């Protein structure tokens, strides 16, 4: 049925589908099934998004399995050249909305020497793209861009060798531009990539022990030779998102598909005594109630029927005899009294005890940080198709490869009978509940033998998604008579015991509710500050505490964008501000003094780049050097500015917030934000700017609004009223982004790109707290800075 | 079940449905119009917004049989193959991150601008206040609306610097 030989079957399908209409028809005829609901035809470059993100042309029907792993050591797994002299790239990543897909195309097009708009991209489909793990850790460009670039560079090398054979001249005598190879001595002699290879395999093996180290013979280009990297082509996914033509994971429909909704325990830790199926059996469209342990779901023909039936199902729940957790108001006293489940070995530099004992001034402060949720705008969802003894899950899970492995294990199916087709979805900053819904859909589909579409409800998503852990912090700083910080103690405690991972078949929510338990709960983590301050004496320690209920709890902790970063940096950079105020020093000057106090640097020049970034932020803002707080103004509105700085991996960021605090209402409006950002080589400046703006505002929402609230029975944050989020009315008047290249040799040919999706989230909350202090003289040591809490703090100090 | 007639994006559909069904499910599952999305089912976030006779309406809390008037969904904004100026501004300004909420942002902005073609900055903030975005694209959404009102030149968001230290 195909012109290809020895091609991984999944790749073959895509190649066939995209190029050979007769084969395509045979293929569909043979399969006996046709996916009906795709049809987006938004054209981006030469391949439509329908092709690359869920069109019928790309998603082959179920009978086409099994689905072996695409071989990352085969060049053909990464790059295909088509008859119209366009290229398709295949990468094992997912774009969560920061435009990484566009950036991948830029990097690979640059290495291949083909025009950006002659390329298309397939991401995150476990049967078609090499397993790069999906997304996470802001490593899309920093780590996973490298094998993509090397593969594209190798494809270019092979194509040039083919051209050399065809034209009968050495490679050195050839030029290549936009996929057309030219004889240097006679530019009229040309041959296109398509002429050289179109629709045939490269058949070139790459080397490397794993997907991260995979490489061909060719070198990637020096930075100075990159032409598409550094430009800002518009994101290819935006037009179909704006005109309504893109089909998302939430939009997929299949013949015979049914709808499912979960019925969650009304009290945390509740157990099912009895399910009365007769309470819904007569409802229209009712198909089945499925119960395993404390997992309960209802399946109906139509979506609204499932919603209705799940609401009406009578379940007799037994309340637990002990409270699953303290109230959200009682959380921090509870955490402080709790016996840690684990403690880190303190990291000690110098002699902090002696230095604190000898200090001219000792400053102490405690900070608290509540549980915060992902609360994705669209609740978790997935569609699972169990036909032909296989399982295809259409999901927006950012780690589609992990979902495939986890579901195969969960269902006891061979891996090659399971595939996950990643499609666009809502906000996946670390871990939404996408994997939970995928496991649930697959389980239910397996049970009833029909495609099942699962979608959570709003209260379920807000209450039951994974949470960023609550923290308490204790900090002490010792200052000498010159006001120099000579000792710093940091002790953090996080409620992160039993932190759940990604797609683990024994810890996803359905698995917990069914009663599965891993041998040992995960230890959890509590991070330490990231800064390059020269402080001669330090003690840094962390500990983990647990809440009473650790399984089947809505307060299950997981990764939330920049895990632990906003919490830790809120405390550490608020405290630096307190120290600056204690010495009557300008906050920018105080930080710069700490950074210039040593000439030592690390291999990534983080100290030098930190200084450059702080200076750039202060310059852009027009920072007036003076200590905080500002002299109190008249009237209801007090204004102030605050700075905070940190790094994440090798990305350095400093942010300045300017606030207006209404002393009569306690309302805080962040009027202006400045961010200076150094992530090394920039792939797409306009895309980066938007990522920075939105990432800062994400943390602003966490600073001003977000807190998971609960009583001793359940989470009470269940919608956008009980769990407020940033709104248009909170938006700053002005956001300034300064893209800094603070490398000592900014034009070096090997300047690496670093991640950019998360560093921005870290310092913002501290910057806002520091600005509020500057405006009012009142130090807020616990977010969110909601009106009533700010007003109470102002009243307490009679501001 | 009973027959309900809906006028959507210039077409008329008569459907045999449970008339109490929320409009969102009918649009998405029966008419295949998936621009509007389920976000909360409570009318709080705006992801499901459609226009009914030009009024931004939360289809997730709208009973289908009570709909009187002409419905426009995201798919119906473009006319004769040309995007609505609001949609074009969204592309020019590169507004979305994940984009899941953008139906609500665009449809709310469209209704706002049809009602008030030259809103002030405060009127934009207030007019858009009920359209939530969890990627926090608000700043660019507002920039895109200003782009529709004033053209690209008046756009305040272009304040960007690049420095090499």
Image (cartoon, rainbow, N blue to C red):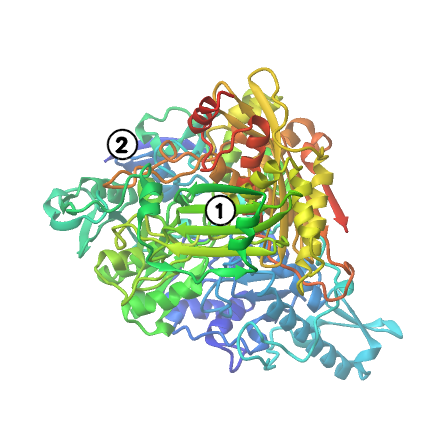
Chain that bears disc 1: A
CA neighbours of label 2 inside 10 A, class few (<14), some (14 to 19), many (20+): some
Foreground: A556 or A253?
Answer: A556
All told, the count of numbered labels is 2
Residue A199 image offset from top left, x and y in percent: 60, 73
Left-right relation of A429 to A770: left
Q: Are labels 2 and 1 on one chain?
A: no
Q: Residue B161 carries which label?
A: none
For this orientation, the residue located farthest to the front is A358
Pointer 2 residue:
B20
- The image shows residue A513, relative to residue A5, as above or below, that is above
Pointer 1 residue:
A475
Residue A729 image offset from top left, x and y in percent: 52, 28
Foreground: A144 or B29?
Answer: A144
Chain that bears disc 2: B
Residue depicted at 18% across the width and 40% down the height:
A312
Query: Is residue A523 among what the camera can see?
Result: yes
Tag 1, which secondary structure? strand
């Amino acid at each position: 049925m195909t012109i290809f030989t020895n091609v991984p079957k999944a790749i073959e399908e895509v190649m066939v589908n995209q190029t050979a209409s007769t084969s395509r028809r045979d293929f569909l005829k043979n399969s006996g099934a046709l996916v009906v609901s795709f049809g987006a035809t938004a054209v981006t470059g030469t391949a439509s998004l329908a092709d690359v993100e869920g069109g019928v042309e790309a998603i082959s029907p179920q009978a086409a399995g099994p689905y072996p792993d695409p071989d990352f050591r085969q060049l053909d797994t990464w790059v295909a050249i088509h008859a119209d002299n366009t290229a398709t790239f295949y990468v094992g990543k997912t774009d969560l909305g920061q435009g990484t897909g566009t950036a991948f195309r830029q990097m690979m097009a640059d290495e291949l020497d083909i025009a950006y708009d002659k390329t298309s991209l397939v991401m995150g489909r476990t049967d078609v793209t090499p397993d790069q793990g999906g997304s996470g850790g802001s490593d899309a460009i920093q780590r996973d861009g490298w094998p993509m670039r090397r593969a594209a560079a190798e494809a270019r090398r092979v194509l040039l060798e083919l051209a050399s054979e065809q034209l009968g001249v050495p490679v050195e005598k050839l030029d290549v531009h936009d996929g057309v190879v030219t004889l240097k001595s006679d530019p009229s002699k040309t041959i296109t990539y398509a002429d050289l290879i179109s629709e045939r395999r490269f058949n070139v093996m790459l080397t490397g022990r794993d997907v991260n180290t995979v490489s061909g013979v060719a070198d990637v280009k020096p930075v100075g030779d990159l032409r598409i990297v550094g430009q800002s082509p518009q994101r290819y996914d935006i037009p179909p998102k704006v005109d309504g033509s893109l089909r998302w994971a939430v939009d997929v429909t299949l013949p015979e598909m049914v709808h499912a909704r979960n019925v969650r325990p009304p009290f945390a830790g509740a157990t099912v005594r009895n399910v009365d199926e007769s309470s819904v059996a007569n409802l229209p469209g009712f198909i089945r109630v499925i119960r395993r342990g404390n997992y309960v779901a209802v399946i109906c023909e139509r979506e609204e029927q499932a919603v209705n039936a799940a609401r009406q199902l009578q379940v007799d729940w037994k309340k637990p005899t002990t409270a699953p957790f303290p109230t959200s108001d009682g959380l921090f006293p509870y955490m402080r009294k709790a016996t840690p489940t684990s403690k880190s070995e303190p990291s000690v530099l110098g002699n902090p005890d002696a230095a604190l004992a000898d200090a001219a001034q000792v400053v102490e402060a405690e900070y608290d940080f509540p549980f915060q949720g992902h609360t994705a705008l669209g609740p978790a969802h997935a569609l699972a198709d169990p036909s032909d003894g296989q399982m295809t899950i259409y999901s927006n899970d950012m780690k589609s490869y992990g979902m495939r492995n986890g579901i195969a294990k969960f269902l006891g199916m061979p891996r090659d009978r399971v595939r996950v087709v990643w499609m666009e979805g809502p906000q996946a900053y670390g871990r939404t509940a996408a994997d939970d819904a995928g496991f649930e859909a697959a389980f239910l589909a397996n049970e009833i033998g029909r495609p099942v579409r699962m979608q959570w409800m709003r209260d379920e998503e807000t209450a039951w998604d994974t949470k960023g852990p609550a923290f308490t912090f204790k900090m002490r700083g010792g200052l000498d008579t010159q006001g120099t910080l000579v000792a710093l103690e940091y002790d953090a405690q996080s409620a992160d015991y039993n932190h759940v991972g990604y797609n683990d078949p024994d810890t996803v929510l359905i698995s917990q509710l069914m009663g599965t338990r891993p041998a040992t709960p995960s230890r959890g983590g509590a991070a330490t500050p990231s800064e390059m301050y020269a402080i001669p004496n330090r003690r840094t320690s962390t500990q983990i505490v647990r809440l009473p209920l650790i399984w089947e709890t809505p307060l299950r902790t997981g990764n939330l964008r920049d895990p632990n970063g906003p919490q830790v940096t809120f405390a550490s950079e608020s405290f630096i501000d307190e120290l600056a105020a204690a010495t009557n020093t300008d906050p920018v000057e105080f930080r710069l003094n700490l950074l210039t106090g040593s000439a030592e640097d690390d291999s990534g020049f983080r100290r030098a780049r930190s200084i450059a970034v702080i200076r750039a932020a202060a310059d852009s803002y027009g920072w007036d050097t003076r200590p905080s707080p500002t002299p109190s103004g008249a009237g209801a509105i007090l204004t102030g500015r605050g700075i905070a700085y940190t790094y994440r991996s090798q990305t350095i960021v400093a942010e300045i917030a300017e606030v207006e605090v209404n002393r009569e209402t306690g309302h805080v409006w962040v009027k202006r934000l400045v961010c200076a950002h150094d992530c090394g080589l920039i792939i797409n400046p306009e895309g980066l700017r938007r990522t920075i703006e939105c990432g800062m505002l994400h943390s602003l929402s966490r600073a001003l609004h977000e807190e998971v609230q609960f009583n001793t029975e359940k989470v009470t944050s269940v919608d956008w009223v009980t769990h407020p989020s940033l709104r248009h009315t909170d938006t700053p008047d002005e956001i300034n982004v300064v893209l800094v290249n603070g490398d000592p040799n900014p034009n070096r040919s090997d300047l690496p790109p670093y991640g950019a999706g998360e560093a921005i989230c870290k310092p913002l909350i501290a910057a806002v707290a520091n600005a509020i202090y500057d405006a009012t003289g009142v130090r807020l040591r616990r977010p969110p800075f909601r009106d009533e809490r700010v007003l109470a703090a102002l009243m307490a100090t009679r501001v | 079940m009973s027959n309900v007639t809906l006028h959507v994006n210039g077409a008329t559909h008569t459907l045999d449905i449970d008339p109490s069904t929320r409009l969102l499910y009918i649009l998405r599952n029966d008419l295949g119009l998936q621009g509007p999305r389920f976000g909360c089912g409570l009318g709080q976030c705006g992801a499901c917004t459609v226009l009914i006779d030009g009024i931004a309406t939360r289809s997730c809390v709208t009973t289908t049989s009570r709909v009187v008037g002409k419905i426009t969904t995201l798919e119906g904004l473009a006319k004769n193959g040309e995007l609505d100026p609001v949609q074009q501004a969204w592309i020019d300004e590169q507004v979305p991150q994940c984009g899941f909420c953008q139906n609500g942002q665009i449809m709310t902005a469209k209704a706002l601008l049809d009602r008030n073609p030259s809103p002030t900055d405060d009127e934009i903030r207030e007019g858009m206040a009920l359209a939530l975005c969890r990627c926090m694209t608000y700043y660019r959404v507002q920039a895109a609306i200003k782009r529709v009102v004033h053209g690209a030149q008046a756009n305040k968001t272009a304040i960007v610097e690049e420095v090499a230290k």
